[in-house]
Amino acid sequence: MDTLDAIILGIIQGLTEFLPVSSSGHLELGKAILGDSSLPEESMMFTVVLHFATALSTIVVFRKDIFDIFKGLFQFKWNEETQFSAKIIISMIPAALIGVFFEDYLEELFGGSVIFVGFMLIITALLLWLADKAKDTGKPVSFMNAFVIGVAQAIAMLPGISRSGSTISTSVLLGNDKTKAARFSFLMVVPLIFGKIAKDLLDGNITEESVGGSHLIIGFVAAFLSGLVACTWMISLVRKSKLSYFSIYCFIVGIFAIAFGYFA
């Protein structure tokens, strides 16, 4: 992977992280089109680093929300901020368990299997279409909802299943308010990404040799900067636009990915 490829993939990650179109799926398709020949674990590492970059951009954009949450927590009361934090923790459990016990299996899916990505994008399209037809009751996210949304996030660890698409769709199908669902969706992934990076650091998977002066740093910067730009206006787009538009897009890209995998 050269510098230009790393920049292109970083921008793809930054722009697609905040839309319900699967950033990991677009990354795998982008790697295949660019001819990336990384080993599965190296490809997975690159994907995780780019997600870390967009997680940081999420923190920057949502810094006021995160500050209010921490402020509420230090009041040591069962207030709205404490309840929100508890729901975030509950939502993390399914994905954390999958990440710990099935990490090796997940890595094998991050090695250019664009046909698999295509089918997963079509599933994402179906989820978005169903959510678009669901009635928005304006209900806030409950504790049980948080766990179910967490299961959706765990499933979205598969490349091609949109994390934001699956979590927002699940939340809307449960009758939750789309605005609250979008906020919960974008914030619930931040602890998981930081946890994954911390685990890789402790396991020795991220070393100075693996990241210093490499395409990982270039991709990280590209993803972070494009993520900052994208997050400020795409969140509003997700909340205001019909999910069916993204459903059609995912279906078209899914068909393209399957065709590319068969004929490339």
Image (tube, rainbow, N blue to C red):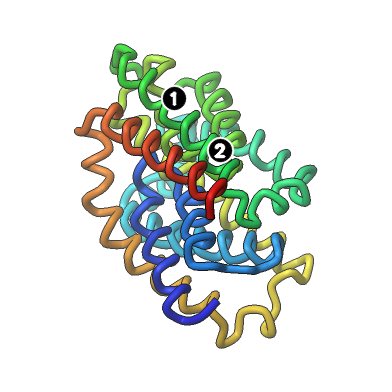
Rate crowding at label 1 as few (under 14), some (14 to 19) or many (20 or more) other CA atoms within 10 Å.
Answer: many
Residue 164: % across, % down? 43, 39
User: With 232 as the anchor, is 89 left or right in this view?
Assistant: right
Rate crowding at label 2 as few (under 14), some (14 to 19) or many (20 or more) other CA atoms within 10 Å.
Answer: many
What number of labels is visible?
2
Quadrant where the N terminus is found in the figure? bottom right
SS of the residue at dot 1?
helix
Sooner in the amino-acid sequence: mark 1 or mark 2 = 1
Give the residue type at disc 1.
Leu
Q: Is residue 171 above or below residue 4?
A: above
User: With 242 as the anchor, is 143 left or right in this view?
Assistant: right
Q: In percent of the image, x 48 and y 37: which residue is there?
A: 121
User: With 27 as the anchor, is 93 left or right in this view?
Assistant: right
Residue 225: % across, % down? 34, 69
SS of the residue at dot 2?
loop
| Residue carrying label 2 | 156
Q: Nearer the viewer, residue 11 or 186?
A: 11
Q: In percent of the image, x 36 and y 48: which residue is there?
A: 18
CA–CA distance in space, label 1 to label 2: 12 Å
Q: In percent of the image, x 39 and y 18: which residue is there?
A: 130
Q: Which of 70 and 138 is in front in this view?
A: 138
Residue 97: % across, % down? 73, 39
| Residue carrying label 1 | 127
Residue 158: % across, % down? 60, 41
Give the residue type at disc 2.
Ala
Q: In this view, does 117 lie above or below 56?
A: above
